[in-house]
């Protein structure tokens, strides 16, 4: 059994410039813990696999395709592969999100 806590992990290098932590990284799946401070956002991007966002804390706005909606703690948002998506923290409080890429992508993410 392996147990991980994001607080003990190194910050992963991403093109988004936010605090991101690899919680689970195997040949089959990738699960990231994202911490967006007030006013931070990801850069819009497209992934070659389906993505699910599970909101741990805060009220981020999530863009999937052309639809942008504010979500809350314990919501899960599905983003189909090959569609632009993004997470925005437009609030004055921290946001924490689990990002699950299933299966783990083998092709590169495309920044838009």
Image (cartoon, helix red, strand yellow):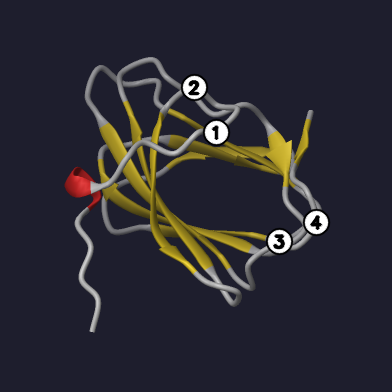
Disc 3 + disc 1, Cβ < 8 Å: no
Q: How many other residues sit within 10 Å of disc 1, few (<14), some (14-19) or many (≥20)?
A: few
The residues tagged by marks 1 and 4 sit, at their Cα atoms, a distance apart of 16 Å
How many angstroms separate mark 4 from mark 2 (CA)? 21 Å
Discs 3, 4 touching: Cβ within 8 Å: no
Disc 1, disc 4: CB below 8 Å?
A: no
Mark 2: which secondary structure? loop
Query: Is the N terminus in the top left, top right, bottom left or bottom right quadrant?
Result: bottom left
The residue sitting at 71% across, 61% down in the picture is: 80
Q: Earlier in the sequence, mark 1 or mark 4?
A: 1
Q: Earlier in the sequence, mark 3 or mark 1?
A: 1
Circle 2 is placed at which residue position? 17
**Residue designated by label 3:** 80
User: Which residue is pictured at 31% across the width and 46% down the height?
Assistant: 72
Quickly name the residue at label 1: 14
Q: Is residue 106 above or below residue 103?
A: above
| Tag 4 residue | 107
Cβ atoms under marks 2 and 1 closer than 8 Å: yes
Estimate the spatial distance between the alpha carbons at disc 3 and disc 4, rounded to whole Å.
Answer: 15 Å
**Residue 63 percent across, percent down from the top left:** 60, 38
Crowd around label 2: few <14 · some 14–19 · many ≥20 (10 Å): few
The mark lying in front, picked from 3 and 4, is: 4
x, y (%) of residue 100? 50, 62
């Amino acid at each position: 059994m392996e147990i991980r806590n994001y607080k003990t992990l190194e910050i992963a290098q991403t093109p988004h410039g936010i605090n991101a932590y690899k919680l689970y990284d195997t040949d089959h799946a990738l699960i990231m813990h994202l911490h967006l401070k007030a006013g931070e956002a990801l850069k819009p991007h497209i992934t070659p696999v389906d993505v699910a966002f599970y909101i741990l804390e805060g009220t981020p706005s999530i863009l999937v395709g052309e639809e942008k909606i504010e979500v809350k703690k314990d919501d899960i948002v599905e983003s189909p592969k090959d569609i632009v998506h993004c997470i925005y923290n437009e609030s004055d409080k921290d946001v924490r999100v689990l990002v699950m890429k299933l299966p783990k992508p083998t092709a590169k993410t495309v920044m838009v």
